[in-house]
Image (cartoon, grey):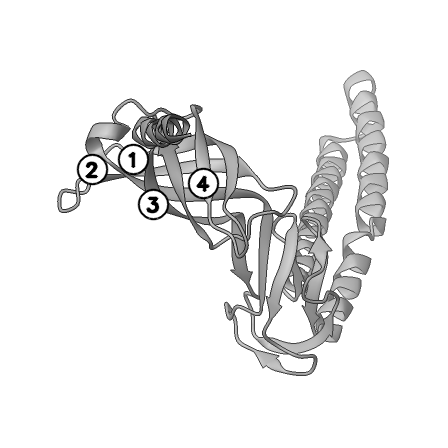
């Protein structure tokens, strides 16, 4: 029995020497506190804390009746092609008249040079009117795009897939531009930021697989991770190098924010 206990103790000691742990802290792969780029009053909140959302889902919107009306008004003008069609038809008629008059001038004496010049002037004016109508149509389309962009500023959408962590405002409250109102995090994939002594980190490379020991409320969990980043510099005061490791957390076994260790042989 004594021999077996001694063997076990030696095995554990050898394992401890074989793997050395370096402290780190975990974080979600994506985490953000988002808000509107403009100020206003909250009209609707479309999600609740704890809800899972997809990238592009609407989270919240400000009062935007004026902006919606402006989009409708500019849309009517942007979609109205009557001025361009009228100017094009007018130009085609003047061109046909000009060609006929020029042909008569060149092949007979029935029209004068002044009449050709007059037809040419009518054609050139019609061409300018068509160009002006086309420019006005493009300007109307741009104004419509600007109106839509202003409306979009009042709609807050999810920047990535994730879970709603917190909502700091209520319906009817006012918000300032760039004020964070919702926190979102994707905890299905996490990152450990660890600090490894220089003489143990020199051979670490992005893409390399490593073992992690992650603290939990009830038990320590072991996971495999892949190195995402190895700092090219070493902190001169501590002689530690920053190493970032990505690991799968689709089972939600690890709560981002807990500490742990990166285990190196």
- Mark 3 or mark 4, earlier in chain: 3
Disc marking residue 234: 2
CA–CA distance between discs 3 and 2? Answer: 16 Å
Q: Which residue is mark 3?
A: 23
Is residue 226 or residue 212 the one in the foreground?
212
Q: Looking at the image, do the residues carrying marks 2 and 4 touch, with CB atoms under 8 Å apart?
A: no
Q: Residue at x 53, y 68 (%)?
A: 180
Is residue 202 or residue 211 the one in the foreground?
211
Give neighbour class at mark 1: few <14, some 14-19, many 20+ (Cα, 10 Å): some
Q: Residue at x 60, y 49 (%)?
A: 186
Q: Quadrant of residue 62?
A: bottom right
CA–CA distance between discs 3 and 1? Answer: 16 Å
Q: Quadrant of residue 164?
A: bottom right
Q: Looking at the image, do the residues carrying marks 2 and 1 touch, with CB atoms under 8 Å apart?
A: yes
Q: Position of residue 197 (x, y in %)?
A: 23, 36
- Mark 3 or mark 1, earlier in chain: 3
On-image quarter of the C terminus: top left
Disc marking residue 231: 1
Vertical position of residue 177 compared to residue 213: above or below: below
Q: Nearer the viewer, mark 3 or mark 2?
A: 3
- Quick one: SS at disc 4? strand
Q: Position of residue 87 (x, y in %)?
A: 80, 45
On-image quarter of the N terminus: top left
CA–CA distance between discs 4 and 1? Answer: 21 Å
- Quick one: SS at disc 2? loop
Disc marking residue 213: 4
CA–CA distance between discs 2 and 1? Answer: 7 Å
Q: Residue at x 71, y 45 (%)?
A: 134
């Amino acid at each position: 029995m004594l021999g077996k206990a001694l063997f076990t103790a030696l095995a554990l000691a050898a394992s401890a020497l074989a793997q050395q742990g370096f402290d780190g802290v975990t974080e979600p792969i994506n985490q953000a506190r988002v808000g509107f780029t403009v100020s206003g009053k909250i009209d609707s909140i479309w999600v609740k804390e704890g809800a899972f959302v997809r990238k592009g889902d609407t989270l919240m919107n400000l009062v935007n009746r004026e902006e919606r009306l402006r989009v409708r008004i500019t849309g009517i003008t942007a979609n109205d092609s009557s001025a361009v069609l009228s100017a094009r038809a007018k130009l085609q008629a003047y061109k046909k008249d000009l060609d006929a008059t020029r042909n008569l001038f060149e092949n007979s004496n029935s029209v004068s040079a002044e009449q050709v010049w007059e037809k040419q002037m009518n054609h050139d004016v019609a061409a300018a009117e068509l160009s002006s109508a086309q420019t006005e149509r493009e300007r109307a389309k741009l104004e419509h795009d600007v109106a839509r962009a202003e409306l979009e500023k009042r709609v807050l959408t999810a920047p990535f897939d994730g879970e709603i962590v917190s909502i700091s405002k209520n319906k009817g409250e006012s918000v300032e531009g760039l004020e964070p109102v919702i926190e979102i995090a994707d905890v299905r994939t996490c990152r450990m930021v660890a600090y490894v002594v220089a003489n143990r980190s020199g051979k670490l490379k992005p893409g390399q697989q490593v073992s992690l020991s992650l603290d939990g409320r009830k038990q320590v969990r072991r996971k495999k991770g892949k190195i995402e980043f190895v700092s090219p510099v070493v902190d001169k005061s501590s002689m530690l190098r920053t190493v970032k490791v990505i690991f799968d957390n689709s089972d939600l076994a690890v709560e981002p924010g807990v500490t742990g260790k990166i285990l190196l042989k």
